[in-house]
Amino acid sequence: MSELNNIALEIISNGKGILAADESTGTMTKRLEDVNVPSTPENRLLFRETLFTSQGMSQCIGGVILYDETIKQNAKNKKIPELISNMNSHPGIKVDTGAKVLAGSSEEKITEGLDGLRERLKEYYKLGAKFTKWRGVYSISKEYPSKLSIHSNAHALARYSSLVQECNMVPIVEPELLMDGNHSAKDCYNKTSEVIKKCFDELILHKVDLKGIILKPNMILAGTKSQDKISNEEVAKLTLDCLKNSVPNEVPGIAFLSGGQSEIQATENLNLINKLNKTNFIMTYSYGRALQQSALKFWSKNIQDIEGTQKVFNHRAKMNTLAAQGKWSKEIENK
Ligand code: 5MM
């Protein structure tokens, strides 16, 4: 088994999932200001450190995606990557530099960060990173995502993945089709299939070892403004069908993003996906908001209450780890 395949499996096996704590300073500032906490480097670290040293972390989280600021910080006299490794988890790093306006398509985005990437990757590897993340963002409408956006983001994701594997780390490939809009679930299914297939065409062209990646896609959902209301079972069935038909068999696993679903919705949908999963892919979570929301709200009321905050986070992590094994239920959630 290749080293990269091994790392990928360690991150996502046995119900373990990924904590996406890679909010850029701008996004983290928004999250903190929403709960009336000043966004200082110390506060950003304190909240994150509280999660990283929790029981939920060592029992449920196989990997943490960090942001550049955090991977270089220290806590409890340790470098953050060392602290994460000591908690039985793998440190990872977001390496894209954000989605910018795509020239030639004024409303769509292209993710940047390829210039100088090889050198940055070497630095992150030395800091202890075992895996990385790059997110392509696509909106859905009648004309979007355009061929241009599908092609250019797939190309960037493949160049990124190939460089990451060259530097001995596992690339998380994240093509996110946004929930915003009035599109139906069927539209989301069709566009997600097209985007994912194109990503794999490019990954193969760039000679990426598919056994050494993790795919981080959206679930198949109707847009937030759509009249098309579908059941959770339907979400799970469409998501599984879409991935079965667009992801090559070599890929070891799929770790979903939550994309703005509520915490419970994201857990419930993941649970149903695993109950119905007949593929060989591991299906787990790589959640940001859906793992952190309640913990952040609790913490904001008393940022010194580490134990209380960890209790809230532990519960969410445990519920998602049960869902990643198809063992979650409403009764267990509310116990
Ligand atoms: C944690 O948020 C990440 C994005 O941060 P920036 O927008 O500041 O770069 C994001 O990529 C995240 O990893 C995924 O979208 C999953 O997060 P959600 O909240 O959708 O589960």
Image: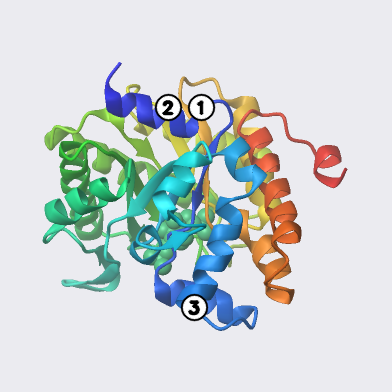
The residue under label 2 is which amino acid type? Answer: Leu
The residue under label 1 is which amino acid type? Answer: Ser
Residue 191 lies, in percent from the top left, at 38, 49
Q: Which residue is mark 1?
A: 13
The secondary element bearing badge 2 is classed as helix
Q: Are marks 1 and 2 in contact (CB under 8 Å)?
A: yes
Q: Looking at the picture, tell me which residue is in the foreground, 179 or 225.
A: 179
Label of residue 29 in the image: 3
The residue drawn where x is 26% and y is 51% is 124
State the separation of the CA atoms marked 1 and 2: 5 Å
Bin the neighbour count of mark 1 within 10 Å (Cα to Cα): few under 14, some 14-19, many 20 and up. some
Q: Is residue 243 above or below residue 31?
A: above
For residue 318, what is the image quadrant?
top right
Q: Is residue 100 above or below residue 114?
A: below
Q: Which residue is mark 2?
A: 9
Q: Residue furthest top?
A: 1
Q: Is residue 270 above or below residue 95?
A: above
Q: Looking at the picture, tell me which residue is in the foreground, 207 or 117.
A: 117
